Image (spheres, rainbow, N blue to C red):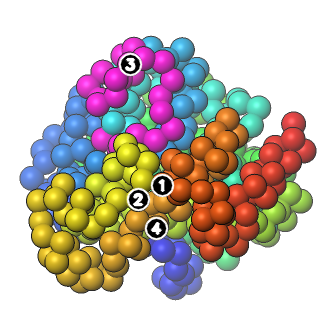
Amino acid sequence: MSSDCDARHGGRHHMSVEFDRRQLNSTVRATAGTAASGREDAQIAISLLGTKAGLEIPTATTLHFGQWLGWPDWMRDGTSLEGSGPLPRTVTLADDLIIIGNIIDNADGYALAQRILAAPRPIMGTTGVLSLLHAPDLGSALRTIVRAIAAQNLFLTIELEETDSHITISMSPPWPMGPLFQFSSMTGLALIYRAIEALACSDAGEMVLETRLCELPEAQAVLAGFQCQIRPSDGAERLSFPAGWQATANPDYDPQLWAVAQTKTAALQTLMGEPDDVAKVRIAIADMLAREHRVPRLKQISLALDISSRTMVRLLARHGTSFHGLVEQERRAKALLLIADCSISLAETARLLGFTDMSSFGRSFRNWFGETPGNVRKSWQSGSAARA
């Protein structure tokens, strides 16, 4: 996964937030035609993503879609998820794609995008909310949000381009996609539009949405929800706004929670950009930690993956990481999700992360984030109360 980097391209500052798709694109050349349904699109995406389709990602905006739709049973059709009702806080990328495909095929996707635009607050997952509420300024918030969206949507090409006058965020399909791209790009740009609107406090009419949906009758209601200029596009879906808006300061800037948002985004980018061999080990570690609530051992994971411990150590070293490093990264990422859920006590959080006592959990948490778990949760709660 690429990190934030600026390079000059003909007077532009260009920041790529795109997953490295060189291997994927070579496979895509053999893919012909466009899927006729959301589920078909999702299955193609899953097959092209390979091992990474098994990685766990936050359910995020899909949770809001499910709640709005009343948690219909068809949302889980074709997934590995059992039962009914609300979705878990994390799912595999494959299950997330199938759920989105089911929503496309069984619900009004344009109405959902329209609801994002009309909601009283921006509809995002934990990372997006933290970034939007606590970043120092609009530019910093937006870059982190775009990076998070790109990391969770490996089947889209997402770019942020900067000139002296405008910032442009574009979304395009890496292969001939059908309804999955239309739905994902429209909801993604709706989320970004709301983020800009929430912090910039400027004339939305100065923003420009370029879309291929201009002439589509069923898309007119959602397009009307964008209180900005609408122009036809013959390629990517784009949203642009004046570059000067980036400097808009955020009065609710909180350095601690902003650091948490950046840490979560960086962890997600690392996870999604890893080589398949490393991703397999990480998935096995995360699965064992979730099932057994204790720190996985090298021998256990090597047995689960049917490779020798020595081979695993060498393999991870070739990719610049280690087994212990992956375990710590998984515990750290899971700690943030658990701390965010105030219904789970700190003692239970420690147990779920495989710690035998609160003191060892507290020491590790301070090493990870520079603060105690209790203080992070209090800061989070006080910020929520202040905004209520």
Pair 3/2: label in front: 2
- Measure how far apart labels 1 and 2 are at the Cα level: 5 Å
Depth check, front residue: 121 or 269? 269
C-alpha gap between disc 3 and disc 1? 27 Å
Position of residue 357 relative to residue 1, above or below, is above
Task: Check the picture and name the quadrant holding the N terminus.
Answer: bottom left
Q: Can you tell which mark lies on residue 328?
A: 4
- Please name which of the two marks, 4 or 1, marks the residue nearer to the observer: 1
Q: Would residue 199 be found to the left or right of residue 9 on screen?
A: right
Foreground pick, 54 / 141: 54
Q: Please say if the residues under marks 4 and 1 sit with CB atoms less than 8 Å apart.
A: no
Q: Which residues are magenta?
A: 73-94
> Which residue is painted at 87% across and 36% down in the image?
388
Q: Position of residue 177 (x, y in %)?
A: 28, 42
Residue at left offset 33%, top offset 77%: 322
Q: Looking at the image, do the residues carrying marks 1 and 2 touch, with CB atoms under 8 Å apart?
A: yes
Answer with mark 4 or mark 1, whichever residue precedes in sequence. Answer: 4
Tell which tag, 4 or 3, sits nearer the viewer: 4
Q: CA distance from mark 4 to mark 1?
A: 11 Å
Q: Position of residue 179 (x, y in %)?
A: 35, 33
Element carrying mark 1: loop
* Residue 229 visible somewhere in the drawing: no
Q: Assess whether residue 240 is covered by the magenta stretch.
A: no
Q: Which residue is mark 2?
A: 295
Q: Residue at x 37, y 43 (%)?
A: 291
Q: Residue type at mark 4?
A: Glu
Marks 4 and 3, how far apart at CA: 31 Å
Given residues 356 and 285, the one toward you in this image is: 356
Looking at the rendered structure, which numbered label has been put on residue 83? 3
Q: Earlier in the sequence, mark 3 or mark 1?
A: 3
Disc 2 marks which amino acid?
Val
In the image, what residue type sits under mark 1? Gly
